[in-house]
Structure formats: structure tokens, C-alpha cells
Amino acid sequence: MTLSAGQPAARLAVVGLGAQGSSISRLALDLGHELLGGVEVGAKVGRPLGEFVDHPRVPDSTIFGSIEELIAQAGEPDVVALAALIPTAATAELAAGLLRRGINVLTLDAELFEGQGPFADSLQAAGEAGGASIVSTGMQDTWWVHLPAVAAAGNHRITSVEMDDVANCGRFSQEVGLHEAGLGLAVSDFAAWAEPVLAAPPVQGAPLRELARLLGFTPGETSYEITPIIHDTPTDWFVPEIMLEPGRVAGARFVVSFPTEEGPTFTGNLRFEILDASAFSKDSFTIHGEVDTVVELPGFSARLYVPMGLVRRIPDVIAARPGFVRTTELPPGRYTHTVH
């Protein structure tokens, strides 16, 4: 089978069948790829895959408890999509084992996006040993790197680049809201919540540095700060149906910035906040230069853009050189229309 752009269909396995893994599976099937199966842990193991992947071509199989079990029963995939929400060290260990077997890997792990850090060398070696490739991708691949790079080509004498992203956290569950933005905390508890978040790489940091490099700049030292958002009136956290008292944390601002050796500065502003139920998440970036180039994406759909960023890279990771391949080494993701 071939895809609409003449590319061959791939045999795909998905590890992690939460919201992202289920969407990756559905979108891949929509584009003509073959889904061999899914891997999970806990109560999902043994349940029908169709309970989590809504597509007429979903295989009539149950969810496997390990990638080894999937391969033994369904065959070896061309690509494994790692969508499980697990620590980066666990993702890297699983990916390295697959690469050594000659199986290509796509991951949504943001800490691996830049191709640097403690796991890059071992993943490069594993890929070279098995002749397979790994790419860390997702929403940032298309929306925070390649799209701004194309827009910047139309400007001149760039002085700064600013990313602005707003997520309406009213749609978060209580558990997710607390994890992602400290929602509902007393202000006095926010600093303790933010401490481990500040110790981890900022979400916009790696994409901004990769964008800077793609534009020919050399990133300098990165600064990062997180501040709480406090409302003076009660806040309707509408999905978990919680009314936050005034003075409770209703959101968080994440600001990452760095200069470059050549002069231009790069800044990312990420705001997670409980907004009105009618408000949608949005994304924008501004490139300051001879003119201001402004691109705004209202109604930004992370539910589509994150998994689709990975699915578009399925042909690319198969064709890539062995080892750890950064998205800046690849052309922008290519659109192909659905075949099913």
C-alpha cells in the first residue's frame, strides 16, 4: 500500500494509549499506515484496541503489555511511536533497545527534542548499531520551528523573535491542572510547586534554540522563570466543576529567553490559565526586523497538532540516516491527504 503522496505505508506500533497515543493511532490509520497494535500497562492490558482507537481499520486485537509481546504476536514494526507519559530516562532506554533491533522510533518526549543532553550519545550509538533512526517531534516541530523559520525568510535584519502561547486550563482535570500549572494552590505553596518545574528544561526552550540555529544564530545562556496568575474574583474551573476562591492560583506564566552571539534575542511566553469556557487556546509568534512579521493561530488545537506532528514524520524517520536525527535536519513535515 502507498500513501497519497506516493510514499509507502509503514507498519506502526504505539506505546502509550492515552489521548496522544490514541490520536496518533487514528491519524496514522487515516493516512493509510498499518497499525500493528498498542502497548500499555495496568488495567488497559488485554482490553480491545478498538476501545481506545476509533477507526474502521483498527486491528481486531487486544492491547499488549510490552513491545516484545506485540512483536512476537503481531510482527516487527517499521516505526514505534513512544507516546507514553514516562520519564525521559525510561523513554531513552526503551528507544535504545528498539534502535539496536533496527526499529525506527518517533517520540513526543520534549526533553529529547534538541538532540542534546545525557541521552543523545547513547541513542546515536544505538541507532548506528541497528541502522535505525530516532526523531523527537510533536507540535513544536511544525509550529515552533519550521513555520517561524519560513516566516522569517520574508523578513530582513531580524532583531528579536517572540513566541506567545495561551492554554485555557479550564479544560484540564484537577490532577492535570495541578501538575501542569499548580492550579488551586495557595500562593504561599506555588514556589515549592515551581521548584522542580524550573529544574526541568522549559517547554519552549529547545524549540526556540533550534529555531535560532536554523536561522543562523548561536544561542547564548537561557533564562527561565515561572510566576503564578492570581484572580481577584472567584474562578470557575469548569471541567472538574471547582470554584476557586480569589487569591488561589488560577494559572502560571512560563518565560524563557536567551540572547544570541549575533545580537537578536529569542523569548517564549507560555501562559496556562483558567479562562472562560468559550475561550480557546491560541498560539502566535512575532518576528521583529525591518518589519514586524506576526503569525497568529487562533483556536490552537494541541489535541490535533501534537499527534499530527509525529504522524507526519513517519516517512521521514524511515528515510533518515541512522542515529539521533533532529527535526532541523529534516524538511518541514509534508501534508498528505487521507486515503481512508
Image (cartoon, rainbow, N blue to C red):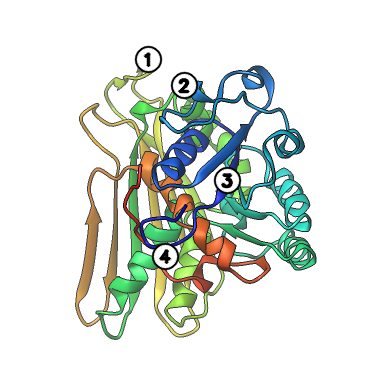
Cα–Cα gap, marks 4 and 3: 26 Å
Q: Which mark is residue 174?
A: 2
Question: Crowding near pointer 4: few (<14 within 10 Å), some, many (20+)?
Answer: many
Cα–Cα gap, marks 4 and 1: 36 Å
Q: Residue 30 at x, y = what percent?
A: 39, 42
Cα–Cα gap, marks 3 and 2: 33 Å
Q: Secondary structure at mark 2?
A: helix
On screen, residue 198 versus residue 291, left or right, reads: right
Q: Which mark is residue 12?
A: 3
Q: Earlier in the sequence, mark 1 or mark 3?
A: 3
Q: Residue 44 at x, y = what percent?
A: 62, 20
Mark 3: which amino acid? Leu
Q: Which mark is residue 9?
A: none
Question: Crowding near pointer 3: few (<14 within 10 Å), some, many (20+)?
Answer: many
Q: Which mark is residue 145?
A: 4
Q: Which mark is residue 242?
A: 1
Q: Which one is in front, 209 or 251? A: 209
Q: Earlier in the sequence, mark 4 or mark 3?
A: 3
